[in-house]
Amino acid sequence: MEMGTYDWPANGTWPWDMDDGIEAVCDDYGYSSISSSNDYYLSWSDTKNEINNGRPFVLSMTYGGTGSGHDQAYGMHSVTCMGYSDGTEDYVFLHDTWDDTNEHYLVFGDWVAAMGTWVIP
């Protein structure tokens, strides 16, 4: 329960509770030097900076679009952002709980709002 998981939305976690939850879990396992924070205004430059520095992060979306290989939109969902493609159209590469085998991609900004949760060792 370190992540503050409640019955909203359907056994979900409030995204703004993730940073404290991550730090609490790390402390519980003896990793007290971990720092975690939320970025409530996720930018493309912040996304690229975290990935370029080898730090995948939690991307929490509000009304997120449909990722590649999926038939339904992400909606209110959090995923792991672990890469990007910087080109004519910018994409983020994701791992999600709907498919634990394949990587998916989504156009950056294909959501109403998004928040990044950074974890820095």
Image (tube, rainbow, N blue to C red):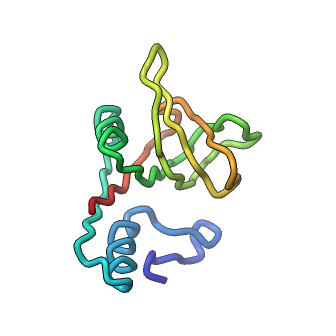
Q: Residue furthest top?
A: 88
> Residue 66, how many percent across, how many down?
65, 37
> Residue 69, how many percent across, how many down?
73, 37
Up-down relation of residue 16 to residue 113 (above or below): below
Residue at 49 percent across and 35 percent down: it is 92
> Residue 106, how many percent across, how many down?
56, 34
In the figure, is residue 59 to the left or right of 70? left
| Front one among 79 and 31 | 31
Q: Residue furthest right?
A: 71
In the figure, is residue 77 to the left or right of 24? right
| Front one among 21 and 8 | 21
Up-down relation of residue 35 to residue 55 (above or below): below
> Residue 54, how many percent across, how many down?
35, 46
| Front one among 95 and 1 | 95
Q: Quadrant of the C terminus?
A: bottom left
Residue at 40 percent across and 67 percent down: it is 18
